[in-house]
Image: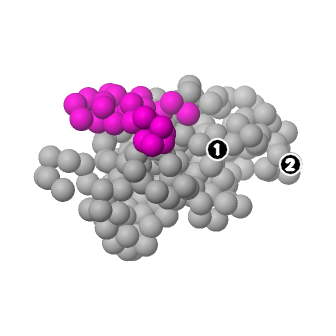
């Protein structure tokens, strides 16, 4: 990997290469939230589920949509937000985006309707890699890395188009990949 390309770190987006064969990550855009010598943690930004938060959290009546964060521990709930002022115990991912924090405060934000889809997103499961695994997958060409140049990408209006949008923004050869057919045999 050339020095000019981003390296795995919090705030980096991992875009699944069009030829990545793992169905869990087909055309996925993963926001890397944590990357250490022990492993990596991220959330898929573009896999909305047909679930509302009220269906996942028993005592919370809310129609906020839930997305798939990844295939690891799909029964766990994670969240990205822009409320570090309220959720000071959260983990900073970028200057504008944080992960986790006191869930009672999150529930209060949801119930008071202070949080919007543009400032708070929920995910079931997460994407995880053991020590060295992500670097190996990148070296093998499974992932395209780019910096999170726009915090709005973590809170997209149209998550299902996000993979193509980010590749087009990257320009050059990546813009061509954005048009890669879902099934190259049908081209």
Q: CA distance from mark 2 to mark 1?
A: 19 Å
Residue sitting nearer the eye, 158 or 121 = 158
Kindly tell me whether residue 151 is visible in this rendering: no
Q: Residue furthest left?
A: 3
Q: Quadrant of residue 34?
A: bottom left
Q: Nearer the viewer, mark 2 or mark 1?
A: 1
Residue 32 rendering spot, x and y as whole percentages: 42, 52
Q: Quadrant of the C terminus?
A: top left
Numbered mark located on residue 175 in the image: none
Decide whether residue 186 is among the magenta residues: yes
Judged left or right of residue 5, residue 91 is: right
Judged left or right of residue 136, residue 22 is: right
**What span is in magenta?**
160-187
Asked if 156 appears above or below 130 in the picture, the reply is above
Q: Quadrant of residue 52?
A: top right
Judging by the rendered image, the residue that carries numbered circle 1 is 67
Judging by the rendered image, the residue that carries numbered circle 2 is 59
Residue at the location (42% across, 64% down)? 40
């Amino acid at each position: 990997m050339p020095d000019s390309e981003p390296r795995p770190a919090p705030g980096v987006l991992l875009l699944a290469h069009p030829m990545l064969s793992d169905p869990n990550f087909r055309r996925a855009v993963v926001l890397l939230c944590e990357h250490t010598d022990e492993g990596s943690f991220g959330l898929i930004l573009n896999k909305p589920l047909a679930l509302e938060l009220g269906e996942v959290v028993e005592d919370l009546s809310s129609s906020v949509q839930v997305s798939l964060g990844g295939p690891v521990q799909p029964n766990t709930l994670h969240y990205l937000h822009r409320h570090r002022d309220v959720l000071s115990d959260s983990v900073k991912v970028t200057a504008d985006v944080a992960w986790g924090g006191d869930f009672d405060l999150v529930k209060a934000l949801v119930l008071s309707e202070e949080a919007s889809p543009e400032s708070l997103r929920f995910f079931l499961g997460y994407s995880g890699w053991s020590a060295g695994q992500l670097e190996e997958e990148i070296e093998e060409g499974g992932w395209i890395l780019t910096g999170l140049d726009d915090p709005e990408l973590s809170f997209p209006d149209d998550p299902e188009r996000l993979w193509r949008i980010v590749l087009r923004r990257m320009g050059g050869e990546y813009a061509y990949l954005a048009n890669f057919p879902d099934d190259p045999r049908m081209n």
